[in-house]
Image (tube, helix red, strand yellow):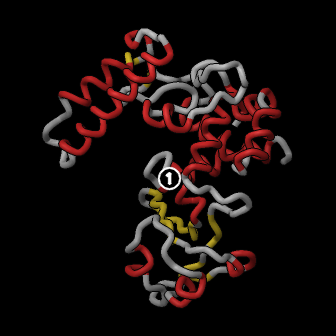
Amino acid sequence: IQAGVRFWKANQSALERAEREYGVPAAIVVGIIGVETLYGQHMGNFRTLDALATLAFDFPSAHPRAAERQTFFRGELEQFLRLTHAAGTDPSSVRGSYAGAMGLPQFMPSSWRHYAVDFDGDGRIDLFNSTADAIGSVANYFKAFQWQAGMPTHYPVTLTPGQTDMDALLAPDILPTFSVESFTTKGALLQGPALQHSGPLALIELRNGEEAPSYVAGTENFYTVTRYNWSSYYAMAVIELGQAVAERLGK
């Protein structure tokens, strides 16, 4: 949170401009970059070329989706080589995560090529050294995946054992499927602004080890956060980190 406060203060103008241009709150962008790399402190030290080549041609065959994943990483290897060729960069010099993600926002090569933007206006996209490019690129990514400005990511929900149709509500997983009416008819009680929500909702289950699970009503914007990483736990970590940083700043 302290690192997030420093990042927000140092990059306030870029965060405000990204929010104006893309409709994505600064707190969400700050949450993403914090969870991904602790604001650039941990961007990975694997050679990206090695990581992608290994996953593309020597993916563990025991994995249940080995063929699908291998195809994905071959595509990412191609995108990486196109990216470095266009930039005139030695592909063996680039470092990133063990899975080939790069820079402050940990973009895969295809995401870099499709969604990264030159937000500082210097004529090049640099997600390693330009915090402005990273901020604008994360916001552009979310806009591309249908982030809706002004919509909350989730609402509180009250469940009553024996009166809530948990099987039906959890069947779609994190995909928003239920109208407010059908959501409440199945025993998931909402209050206040949630009752006026016009889009679909999902019942998000967050397990807490041996403690009781937590539940929230996730909106389409919650689902959009999971397009960055397919996990409700990841999405809630991003959201709550961003909120905590904003609260520390008094926003």
Residue identified by numbered label 1: 226
Number of other residues with Cα within 10 Å of mark 1, as a class: few under 14, some 14 to 19, many 20 or more: many
Q: Residue at x 56, y 74 (%)?
A: 200
Q: Is residue 28 above or below residue 204?
A: above
125 or 166, which is in the foreground? 125
Residue type of the residue flagged with mark 1:
Thr
Counting from the top left corner in percent of width and height, residue 31 is at: 64, 42
**How many badges with numbers are in the image?**
1
Q: Residue at x 18, y 43 (%)?
A: 67
211 shown above or below 20: below
Q: Position of residue 187 (x, y in %)?
A: 53, 87
Q: Is residue 73 left or right of residue 136?
A: left
The residue at 43%/30% (across/down) is 109
Quadrant the N terminus occupies? top right
Query: Is residue 71 at least partly visible in the picture?
Result: yes
Residue at disc 1, secondary structure: helix
Task: Return the x and y of residue 196 as percentages of the image width and height.
Answer: 71, 80
Q: In the image, residue 9 lies at what x, y percent?
A: 81, 31
Quarter occupied by residue 134: top right
Q: Nearer the viewer, residue 163 or 29?
A: 29
* Relative height, residue 28 to residue 36 (above, below): below
Location of residue 2 with respect to 191 vertically, above or below: above
Please tell me which residue is depicted at 49% across the width and 51% down the height of the picture: 227
Q: Of all residues shown, which one is farthest toward the left?
A: 61
Q: Quadrant of residue 195?
A: bottom right
- In the depicted view, which residue is nearer to us: 166 or 135? 135
**Residue 212 seen:** no
Left or right: where 44 falls relative to 66: right
